[in-house]
Amino acid sequence: MALLFLSRQRCKALQNVDELSEKVFAIIDLNQTCALATLTKNTKPEVSLTPFIYIDEHFYLFISDLASHTENLRTQEECSLLISEPIKSTGNSFAQKRLSLTGRARFIDVKSQSHEPILNKFEEKHGPTVSLLKTLPDFHLVEIEITNGRFIESFGKAFSFDRMSIETAQLDNGK
């Protein structure tokens, strides 16, 4: 009897992981931009808005030297991303589903084998402007490797997880 009970618990846990995963990736798929939090060389926080794509558990940004976040990421690789559902989805700005992620930035060399295929994916999601930006020497492809995340689903319902491994998610009581 205990074995059957454990199996049912495990099945329910797996079902919950699948449901949570769907919710997390729906927010990623619905958005084209994220808030990017970086630190200046004097460790002052800055936040900006930037287009992103998500491929194989990594986020990618295509950013310009003209933006302060580019220099910030060169001097301090730690950063955070915030992606939220549109306010019109809930009608209540306090109840927006949102995904807060912490990670490390790595600039991808233009000669890297992965550079062009990733930029092609960027163009698929963000349109023909990327073709022009690819020709400009001040634009750089940056990979964000996520170290941990937090998905806020509703009032009093948040989940913390390691990397982008939703199966590690734990209900987070905020303490």
Image (cartoon, rainbow, N blue to C red):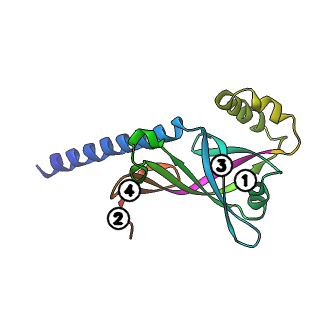
The tag on residue 49 is 3
Q: Could you tell me residue 81's position as x and y percent? A: 59, 53
The kind of residue on which mark 3 rests is: Leu
The earlier-in-sequence mark between 3 and 1 is 3
The earlier-in-sequence mark between 1 and 2 is 1
Judge from the rendering whether residue 79 lies leftward or rightward of residue 64; answer left or right: left
Tell me, yes or no, whether the two marked residues, 1 and 2, touch with CB atoms within 8 Å: no
The earlier-in-sequence mark between 3 and 2 is 3
* Residue 55 vertical placement versus 82 (above, below): above
Please say whether residue 165 is one of the residues in the magenta stretch.
Answer: no
Tell me, yes or no, whether the two marked residues, 3 and 2, touch with CB atoms within 8 Å: no
- Of discs 4 and 3, which sits in the foreground? 3
Task: Identify residue for label 2.
Answer: 173
Q: Could you tell me residue 33's position as x and y percent? A: 61, 42
Provide the secondary structure element on which disc 2 rests: loop
Provide the secondary structure element on which disc 1 rests: strand
**Is disc 2 surrounded by few (<14), some (14 to 19) or many (20+) residues within 10 Å?**
few
**Is disc 1 surrounded by few (<14), some (14 to 19) or many (20+) residues within 10 Å?**
some
**Is disc 3 surrounded by few (<14), some (14 to 19) or many (20+) residues within 10 Å?**
few
Closer to the camera, 35 or 111?
35
Magenta-highlighted residues: 140-149
Q: Could you tell me residue 2's position as x and y percent? A: 14, 52
Please say whether residue 146 is one of the residues in the magenta stretch.
Answer: yes
Provide the secondary structure element on which disc 3 rests: strand
Tell me, yes or no, whether the two marked residues, 4 and 2, touch with CB atoms within 8 Å: no
- Kindly report the distance in space between the C-alpha atoms of the residues bearing marks 1 and 2: 32 Å
- Of discs 1 and 2, which sits in the foreground? 2
Judge from the rendering whether residue 158 lies leftward or rightward of residue 78; answer left or right: left
Q: Could you tell me residue 9's position as x and y percent? A: 22, 48
Judge from the rendering whether residue 78 lies leftward or rightward of residue 154; answer left or right: right
Which residue is at 48% across, 41% downward? 86
- Of discs 3 and 1, which sits in the foreground? 3
